[in-house]
Image: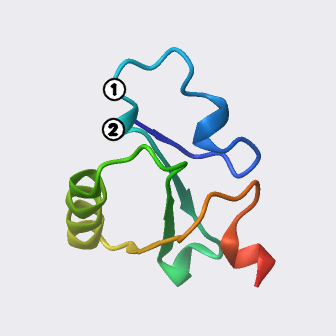
């Protein structure tokens, strides 16, 4: 399960989720032509979930990158 919210990190929405290792945040950055897609975890996400999602996204156009820490806003905006 991937959230697409830059306002709510996944750590704030996983209380009732049984398999926390399958949850992450996924943000598509603008402009759409940039193709950048940010993947972020609150620390529960399994590495295999990231790898599978990165492979799937890459086949369809987006260029995913992984944030090293959870944040309340997009890493792209903070830079």
Q: Is residue 42 above or below residue 69?
A: above
User: Residue 67, position in %: x, y?
Assistant: 53, 70
Q: Is residue 3 left or right of residue 7?
A: left
Q: Secondary structure at mark 2?
A: helix
At label 2, counting other C-alpha atoms closer than 10 Å, the crowd grade (few under 14, some 14-19, many 20 or more) is some
Proximity of marks 2 and 1: CB atoms separated by less than 8 Å: yes
- Residue 24 at x, y percent in the picture: 46, 46
Residue occupying the point 21% across, 55% down: 48
Check disc 1: other Cα within 10 Å, few if <14, some if 14-19, many if 20+: few
The numbered mark at residue 45 is none
Position of the C terminus, as image quadrant, is bottom right
- Residue 50: name its quadrant: bottom left
* Tag shown at residue 19: 1
In percent of width and height, residue 30 lies at 65, 72
Choose between 2 and 28: the one closer to the eye: 2
Which numbered circle lies on residue 22?
A: 2
Q: Is residue 27 left or right of residue 79?
A: left
User: Height in image: 70 above or below 64?
Assistant: above
Query: In which quarter of the view is residue 11 placed?
Result: top right
How far is the residue under mark 2 from the one under mark 1? 6 Å
All told, the count of numbered labels is 2
3 relative position to 50: left or right: right
Residue visible at 32% across and 73% down in the picture:
61
- Dot 1 lies on which element? loop
């Amino acid at each position: 399960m991937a959230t697409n919210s830059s306002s709510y990190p996944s750590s704030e929405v996983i209380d009732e989720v049984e398999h926390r290792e399958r949850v992450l945040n996924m943000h598509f950055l603008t402009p759409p032509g940039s193709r950048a897609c940010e993947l972020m975890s609150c620390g529960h996400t399994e590495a295999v979930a990231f790898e599978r999602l990165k492979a799937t996204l890459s086949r369809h156009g987006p260029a995913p990158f992984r944030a090293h820490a959870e944040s309340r806003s997009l890493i792209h905006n903070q830079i």
